[in-house]
Image (tube, rainbow, N blue to C red):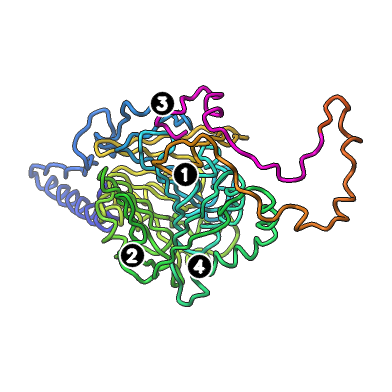
Amino acid sequence: MGMDRRAFLASASVAGLGMAASTIADAAGAQPSAAPAQPQPNNPYGGRPGGGISMPEYFRPWPAIKNRNLFLPGTEALPGDEMRITFLGSSPWPPSHSQKGTSILVELGNGTLQPRRFFFDLGNGSVGHAIALQVPAALINDIFISHLHTDHFADLPYMYPFRAFSGGFTPLRVYGPSGRTPELGTRHMVKHMREMNRWHEENFNACPAGDGFEIEVHEFDWQDRNGICYDQDGVKVRHWPRSHGKDGASAYRLDWEAAGLSFVWTGDGRPDELSALYGKGADVFVTEGTIDTPSLSAMKIGSPSELWEYTIDVYHTLYYAAGYLFKVTQPRCAAICHFEWSGDQLADESVAQVRAHWPGLFMFGKDLRVINVTRDAIWAREAVVGGDAAPASMDPRWLVKPGEALPERIPLPTPTMPREVQQEQFLRDLEIDPKKYYPPDVYRKPVQKWPGVVLNPREMLKARGIDPDQGDHG
């Protein structure tokens, strides 16, 4: 460990020469020389007997973590000085049972079960994991898209109408890069995504949605180096361009100034000098990665190795290069997301390629891996979710702006396009009379005109055994 191939071969050659000289000396009756010292692996964080050779002393759980071995959603209020990073998806292609499309959730603690949340990319299937983790759909917001490959935003058109339907009555905020031309930027994508969803939006406007279908697009210049695209309440998110086969791919760095914590997500791309520069000193540095075994991939998949080589060398970061970036940036925790897991048979090789440069704390950001971070410690666990996990129970406090008192009444928004406005009468005339399928003793008259729904938040909370005046927001 710590030697590259050339250094290893050089040392082996020197050792071979030494043995040859020793043999000649022995033949002449001389005293044989001592054997050369063998290289020893070293813990870069200093000696830690019983703690391994890559684990720092700060890799440990702490009292705020309720279960040291597993993350149980909905059981841990995040303290005000703690960051939690959850990998909602980690795969580029193909999707699998164990890997959904790339997405990383960063949560900043406020002492409640509903911390500040930031989503970095929103790949296919990732929203399902967010819902299973008891993230309320109404509170999904502030989505930072690294680039416009579909595996990084495929759940956006699926998620946003259902978010509005689920009580997300305020506009969605999406951040992302421009492109070489306006048609290649995030704003253009969102505009046409909504056109694609026109039928869906109008149909759901028969339900209370408020302004939930509106999307505030914060498009920044993809060429900006270390530009600021978010700056609110002590949190800054910066961005810079990356080489990913086309203009318009960006990396992000989040700095939470009050807690002194930071997070980097490079997005996709080739190893680059800007990520090495702007990612320095991050608490958690996450890059994408690809194992450099094109000949083995060719044998596994059947396609020519040259195709794999070309794809890697135009678009992606080799595990060797990921390790090099970690060495340059020196994060407290290094991770790789957006990778095709090559199976246990190549797991050791994957780690070995990273370890060619980086001996420190490292892990793969596989789906549902959770990393908790404070200034003094870091801990990683797997989240436990059911196969058919249900969404979080409705909490009326989600509908109240932060800092506002809980009102006595919360009227739901009036639908803007009720069914009778957007549907031909003859279709309703084709419906079967409900009395034909309802058992007589459970029949109720169908509610097909908006009745006007008003929530009594205090009554709802008390029914769930929650004190309406407590500070916790769900």
Amino acid type of the residue tagged 3 in the rendering: Asn
Taking 234 as reference, is 434 left or right? Answer: right
**Residue at the spot of label 3:** 67
For the residues labelled 4 and 3, say whether their Cβ atoms are less than 8 Å apart.
no
Q: Which of the two discs, 1 and 3, labels the residue nearer the N terminus?
A: 3
Q: Residues within 10 Å of mark 2 (few under 14, many from 20)?
A: some
Which residue is at a point 48% across and 77% down the rendered structure image? 181
Give the mark nearer the N terminus: 2 vs 1. 2
Q: Compare residues 293 and 186 and report the one nearer the observer.
A: 186
Circle number at residue 354: none
- Determine whether label 2 and label 3 are within 8 Å by CB: no
Q: Which of the 4 image quarters holds residue 271?
A: bottom left
Whole-number angstrom distance, CA of label 4 to CA of label 2: 26 Å
443 versus 249 height, above or below: above
Instruction: Report x, y in % for residue 261.
Output: 28, 45
Amino acid carrying label 2: it is: Asp
Whether the residues at callouts 2 and 1 have beta carbons within 8 Å, the answer is no
- Which label sits in the foreground, 4 or 2? 4
Q: Which residue is disc 4 drawn over?
A: 187
Image location (x, y in percent) of residue 53:
27, 37
